[in-house]
Image (cartoon, rainbow, N blue to C red):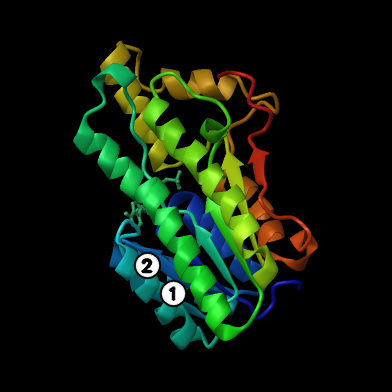
Amino acid sequence: MSITGKVVLVTGAGQGIGRGIALRLAHDGADIALVDLDQTKLDAVADEIRQIGRRATTFIADVSDRAQVHAAVEHAHSELSGFDVIVNNAGIALVGPISDATPEEVSKIWSVNVDGVLWGIQAAAAKFQALGQRGKIINASSIAGHDGFAMLGVYSATKFAVRALTQAAAKEYASDGITVNAYCPGVVGTDMWVTIDKRFAELTGAPEGATYEKFVGGIALGRAETPDDVAGFVSYLAGPDSDYMTGQAGLIDGGLVYR
Ligand code: ADP
């Protein structure tokens, strides 16, 4: 397989899309460094990866902390004897009208979704450069990084920012043989969407589940997205078939027409 033996670090790998990406890349032959905030969740995913027959290592890091992200990259390299790909996947949501956003909320989501990706880009690129090798950086944007969604304005802003970092980093690191791309999921039925739906219900009086169903009803392909739907595209971005692609932010949203 094309990514057999590659070492991939995935942030936010304890559940949801990050877990799906980690498992898919392991199935495709990669060894995985799993990074998240919760050791119990990471241990469970690491066990699943070992059952697939690949190596896994875990590291607790808050991606909003630059030093912790650099330490995570060092851990991946030393434990798995290599470092080829980083997937800057960790993220959080914020639901609410722009008029209600507080400085604390905005700082928090920005520090995870944008700073976290920035530190991941920096740490990975520095490591690839130090090793004198090519590498791939893959960042989590969103359909909300292509369109500003009502009640998700600050979240959307963070995901637009990830696209900006992806484009700029692609240009800055191209001469080092480092590619930088992003994936942009639509409506994925993870805990994040449970949180988003509940918050919409609190704020708008909509019944619980109604907002999720409304968004899913706007998907041209007629069903919610799964982590596996995202992971297949990330596997492509991690592998040699995407070697000539850089600076792109691919939508994988089932043709979401409701916005
Ligand atoms: P998604 O739909 O993106 O998969 P989830 O909320 O299900 O959403 O998963 C996001 C993952 O990112 C969780 O495992 C969460 O613990 C992780 N995460 C969130 N914030 C951070 C952070 N600051 N540092 C590391 N991991 C984080």
Say which quarter of the image contains residue 5: bottom right
For image coordinates 44% across by 56% down, the residue present is 118
Q: Which mark is residue 56?
A: none
Q: Which residue is mark 1?
A: 73
Crowding near pointer 2: few (<14 within 10 Å), some, many (20+)? many
Extreme residue toward the top, this view: 205
Residue type at the position of mark 1? Val
Secondary structure of the residue carrying numbered label 1:
helix
Q: Which residue is mark 2?
A: 69
Q: Nearer the viewer, residue 21 or 157?
A: 157
Residue 38 % position (x, y): 29, 62
Up the image or down, 44 lies above or below 80; here it is: above
For image coordinates 32% across by 26% down, the residue present is 198
CB atoms at circles 2 and 1 under 8 Å apart? yes
Q: Is mark 1 within 8 Å of ligand 1?
A: no
For image coordinates 45% across by 86% down, the residue present is 79
103 left or right, relative to 160: left
Q: Is residue 97 visible?
A: no
Q: Is residue 35 visible?
A: yes
65 left or right, relative to 197: left
Q: Nearer the viewer, residue 196 or 144?
A: 144
Say which quarter of the image contains residue 134: bottom right
Q: Quadrant of the N terminus?
A: bottom right
Residue 19 % position (x, y): 48, 58
